[in-house]
Amino acid sequence: MEVLTESADGTERFYCGPVGTAMWIVLRQHDGDVAAAANVLAGLWDTAPANALADLEIWVDEMRDAGLVRSEPGP
């Protein structure tokens, strides 16, 4: 997957391999709910939900640092 973002320096490209792509898709399917997305990923990857959540939170932090996602307060 390739994600594009605009910055002061122009268009930046970010590439995600299969794991990052799966995280992106599941996170979008769950409207940004990291816990819900992690539970789905845990089932797909046959791992503990806590492990999937830790990995997903690290990835989301990296995506936030790159300006590709943002934190918003829940309802």
Image (cartoon, rainbow, N blue to C red):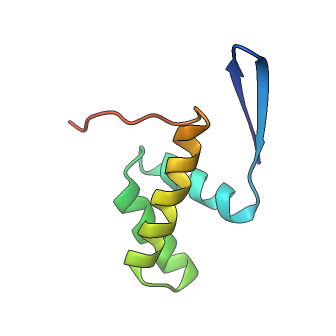
Q: Is residue 57 above or below residue 44?
A: above
Residue in the foreground of this view, choosing between 59 and 75: 59
Q: Is residue 56 above or below residue 75?
A: below
Which residue sits at x=51%, y=70%?
A: 41
**Residue 17 image offset from top left, x and y in percent:** 76, 59
**Residue 53 image offset from top left, x and y in percent:** 42, 67
**Residue 8 image offset from top left, x and y in percent:** 70, 13
Side of 15 relative to 47 (left or right): right
Picture quarter containing residue 36?
bottom left
Quadrant that contains the C terminus: top left
Picture quarter containing residue 39?
bottom left
Residue furthest left as drawn: 75
**Residue 74 image offset from top left, x and y in percent:** 24, 38
Residue in the foreground of this view, choosing between 62 and 40: 62
Q: Give the tally of numbered discs.
A: 0
Residue furthest top as drawn: 8
Which residue sits at x=48%, y=79%?
A: 43
Which residue sits at x=58%, y=44%?
A: 63
Q: Is residue 54 above or below residue 61?
A: below
Which residue sits at x=74%, y=52%?
A: 16
Side of 30 relative to 5 (left or right): left
